[in-house]
Amino acid sequence: MSPSLHRSACPYDCPDTCGLLVQVEESCATAVRGDPEHPHSRGTLCPKMTHYEQTVHSPLRLTTPLLADGPKGSGAFRPIPWDEAIERISTRWKEIIATHGAEAILPYSCSGTMGIVQKNSGHAFFHKLGASRLARTICTPAKNAGWEAVMGKTPALPPATAAQSDLVLLWGINAIATNLHGFSHVRAARKAGGKTFLIDTYETATAAVADRVFLVRPGSDGALALGLMHLLVREGLVDHGFLQTQTQGFPELAAQVLPAFPPERVAALTGLSVAELEELAQAFGQAQAPYILIGGGLSRYGNGGMNIRSILCLPALVGAWGRPGGGAFVGVSGGGGFKLDEVTREDLLPGPVRTVNMNQLGQALEHLNGPPVKSLYVYHSNPAAVAPDQNAVLRGLARTDLFTVVHERFLTDTARYADLLLPATSSLEHSDLYRSYGSYCIQRVRPAIPAVGQSRSNWEVFELLAEAMGFTDPFFQQSADDLIDHLLALPSPAREGLDLEALNAGIPVELAAPAAGHWHTPSGRIELLNPKLDPPLPDYRERHAEQPTLPFSLMTAPSLYGLNSSFHEQERLRDMAGGMRLLMNPDDAAALGLCDDQPVLARNEWGEVRFQLSLTPKVPPAVVVAEGVWWSRFAPGPRTVNALTSQRLTDMGEGSTFYDNRVEVQPV
Ligand SMILES: Nc1nc2c(c(=O)[nH]1)N[C@H]1C(S)=C(S)[C@@H](COP(=O)(O)OP(=O)(O)OC[C@H]3O[C@@H](n4cnc5c(=O)[nH]c(N)nc54)[C@H](O)[C@@H]3O)O[C@H]1N2
Ligand SMILES: Nc1nc2c(c(=O)[nH]1)N[C@H]1C(S)=C(S)[C@@H](COP(=O)(O)OP(=O)(O)OC[C@H]3O[C@@H](n4cnc5c(=O)[nH]c(N)nc54)[C@H](O)[C@@H]3O)O[C@H]1N2
Ligand code: SF4
Ligand SMILES: [Mo]
């Protein structure tokens, strides 16, 4: 049979949501390439996805339901049929509900697959059940809260705006790794003669394509933003016309906050020199249309929300929003014009139920007020690897009285702790509807190949569980495609005039971006002063790990060759990443008597982790970097990076604080 081509979309948690063309031969995906007709990704893929077929048909794929056949964590299982697996789950849950109440059941899901239907397919089920709710706050809630503090519900500018800017600040974003296609617009701006500046805590891969790199002390970006505002005022570089007509609170900000941030103080807080601060302020203040692309890293601190809030005042101060190419970008929200509550079905909740913060899974499993968690249902997430305070999470998962079900494609660190392990389809095997958080593209996707082995999609498993639990609502009897049809049939202003036929045929289409220049805030203005917040004006806030109790700040940064804990099934990508490494400045290493490639132990109050050391001047003194979230089976020791991160939350949005930890490092 000759190969056929199928359109699909990249399902991973990446702002680009690239279009894929999948070559299929005899029911197998044999090659994957970028879809040239995708309006945002235009035919290119990142290195992670160029051999997606190696993930889809990996020999490590789970292909049947498995029942634990050994101690938790051992990874010993025996196959059982699907009907027995579903029967065991429903029987156990009915017992737990009768004894402890439904809140003793906790779902845990995150971002293994990003389509609207498969990602959210458990919500309606667990709401109907009355299970504990999960606050899904591991990613960027503090970044979003920082945006909302200043910009309210103002929608994002289209990412192509950056191409018109004459100065792009890449602020805490390793765009080459995490936003390759958004970055193409920054490249275009640079090609047209604009400048690109990077502000990070070490020289990431993105540093190589920046005109200037400013390395700041971790968690000090709020101070930097306030210091730049001080200089913009001092140098007469603010746009008074814009401030008067489009913003609120500039006089208060200038009088009450900014005098406290002279460059000398800000230099001490950020580690930049006064000359560097002046250079940055001059460049920003004199640019025609400065644009800031903001990453998530600097929001994952105890002061993360405030850092973002302070940065977002900068474009307003110089009136950047008023000029084509100017402004700031944190991400597209708004659900792509789809009514998400038609999927999540809050209305099925029996009444108020408790909420567990996903960043505190360890605490929730070890000691929670109210009924203990007696059952955990994990789907499209790998909390044993990605959640902070790994030792606490693993202690919880090891509880013999905890009934853990994991729905996965692979035997991940979390799957090893399952009582019951269910095989999941990959995105090429199920239907979904994709929106994007980095562009305004949407795409409907249908299966390109049949399910591998006996794997089932998230949606299908919840259909089975709903039936077993006796839920008769028609909602649970429809297929994923029925629900997608329903979502598309609901009218939405965002989708007005859209080619529905093309969308239904699987062609990626772009929604019209909302009109610029309208501020969706309570005051109708950009809120430099937000009266609803405490404090109403942005101000400097310390991070959790401000005090240098241990010598190194640990950066838990994204890897070019993995996506959180995903992609480790591909040997090719593991090799390209070069193993689980800790990057350190050569001077720090010399002071500790450590050499390149040596096995080392990083430790702090939460745990200890073995790494292979890499010495590089790209990392400044007093900082160490661990890129990627490895599977423990490919790690040098029994633990991976999140054994060194804490369950402390951000100042706004109850987010994760992955970057806000210190460690000491010693030879093994
Ligand atoms: N290749 C790859 N792509 C990914 C991911 C991945 O793991 N790998 N993850 C995906 C996910 S889930 C998300 S949420 C997105 C975004 O993923 P994020 O983790 O938000 O990554 P970035 O936005 O690139 O931002 C991280 C950058 O912030 C820097 N940083 C840390 N602390 C500070 C600080 O105090 N100040 C400053 N200025 N910089 C700091 C880090 O060094 C790093 O370069 O990317 C997605 N795409
Ligand atoms: N140290 C450190 N920790 C981090 C981060 C970091 O940068 N550094 N990043 C954090 C961030 S921003 C995020 S968003 C989280 C993400 O954390 P997670 O959401 O846990 O993301 P992944 O690690 O990609 O794991 C997703 C899992 O879903 C599985 N999967 C994929 N598709 C499907 C499907 O259709 N159905 C089912 N049932 N399973 C599927 C995959 O096999 C994979 O094991 O990690 C956080 N943790
Ligand atoms: S991970 Fe991101 S850049 Fe790579 S193919 Fe997927 S959407 Fe595109
Ligand atoms: Mo994320």
Image: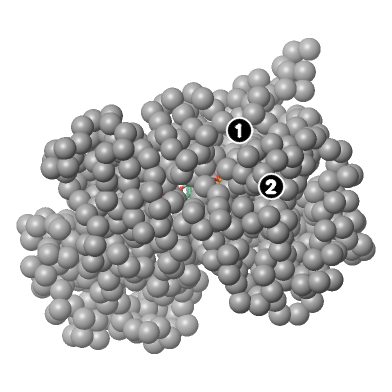
Question: What is the tally of numbered marks visible in this picture?
Answer: 2
Q: Which image quarter: residue 7?
A: top right
User: Residue 637 location in percent, x, y?
Assistant: 43, 38
Q: Is residue 5 visible?
A: yes
| Image vertical order of residue 192 relative to residue 513, above or below | above
Q: CA distance from mark 2 to mark 1?
A: 33 Å
User: Residue 169 location in percent, x, y?
Assistant: 28, 53
Q: Nearer the viewer, residue 316 or 9?
A: 9
User: Residue 140 location in percent, x, y?
Assistant: 47, 60
Hey, what amino acid is under mark 1? Leu
The residue that disc 1 covers is 20
Q: Quarter of the image containing the N terminus? A: top right
| Foreground label between 2 and 1 | 2
User: Residue 543 location in percent, x, y?
Assistant: 30, 67
Does any atom of ligand 3 lie closer than 8 Å to the CB of label 1? yes
Q: Which image quarter: residue 428?
A: top right
The residue that disc 2 covers is 418
Q: Kindly identify the residue that appears in the image at 58 percent across and 69 percent down.
A: 367
Label 1 neighbour load within 10 Å: few <14, some 14-19, many 20+: many
Q: Kindly identify the residue that appears in the image at 61 percent across and 77 percent down.
A: 369
Choose the circle earlier in sequence order: 2 or 1: 1
Q: Kindly identify the residue that appears in the image at 42 percent across and 34 percent down.
A: 636
Hey, what amino acid is under mark 2? Ala
